[in-house]
Amino acid sequence: MLKVKRFVLLPGYETNTYLVYEPSSRQAVLIDPAAVGGQVSEFIERERLELRYILLTHGHSDHIGGNKFYKKLYPQAKLCIHRADAPMLTDAKANLSAFFSQTIISPPADAYLADEQVITVGTETLKVLHTPGHTQGGVCFLSEHILFSGDTLFAMSVGRCDLPGGDHAQLMSSIRTQLLDLPESLTVYPGHGSQTTLAEEKRNNPHLKELR
């Protein structure tokens, strides 16, 4: 079973960065490296993990700020994002960092993610679910017991859609078609805030009322 280590490298935005690994093989992936943080690399080295991928749920600056740092530390790790969000990696206006008087530029993608693509982590897998709406290239990552929902679904909320590339109706459609029929027992690890379960969100998330 995959293990998850959560880091909050960008506390001002409560952005979650997840290190996901399979203990027997020690293979790992890093999801949404929000900022530079030595605690991630320290954990990787302490556990003697092999970082195979840097996976991005979408291209906003608060999810990609650590890409350059971790890609330099672990050049073998493939940096992956959906093709629709790939231009955001190297464009400070597109990733919105320029609007906050910053210039966050990531290395370009090594590979593009696609809906239903399967990523192997040791003996376990992560399945890519394309969930546009927050951004056009937004994705979630699904394993047998876990869903990494990025900025698609939060505890008692959903991703905002008032930023460039956002579309509320599209986001709701993505949640309805890609997430609502998944097992309710799934633990949901969102891009911001605390973890939840799919059962909890289906029953109590006020934003999902229109989908019931």
Image (spheres, rainbow, N blue to C red):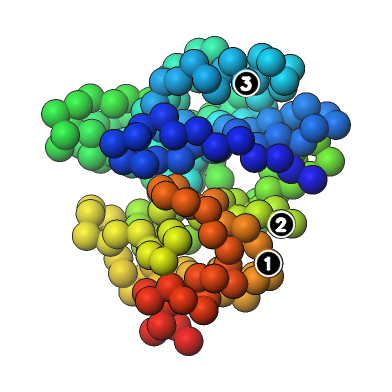
Instruction: Choose the circle earlier in sequence order: 3 or 2.
Output: 3
User: How far is disc 3 from disc 2 in space, using C-alphas?
Assistant: 23 Å
Of pointers 3 and 1, the one earlier in the residue sequence: 3
Q: What residue type is labelled 1?
A: Ser
Q: Residue 185 carries which label?
A: 1
Residue type at mark 3 is Phe
- Residue 184 higher or lower than 38, as above or below: below
Q: Residue at x 36, y 32 (%)?
A: 10
Element at badge 3? helix
Mark nearer the N terminus (2 vs 1):
2
Q: Dot 2: few (<14), some (14–19), or many (≥20) neighbours within 10 Å? A: few
Residue occupied by mark 2: 145
Residue 45 numbered tag: none
* Up/down of 51 relative to 82, above or below: above
Q: Find residue 209 and report its horizontal and vertical position in percent.
A: 41, 83
Could you say whether the residue bearing mark 2 is in a helix, strand or loop?
loop
Asked if the residues shown at circle 2 and circle 1 are in contact, with their CB atoms under 8 angstroms apart, the answer is yes
Along the line of sight, the residue nearer the viewer: 7 or 65: 7
Q: Mark 3 points at which residue?
A: 43
> In the picture shown, does residue 32 fall above or below 127?
above
Vertical position of residue 131 compared to residue 208: above or below: above
Residue at 28% across, 61% down: 161
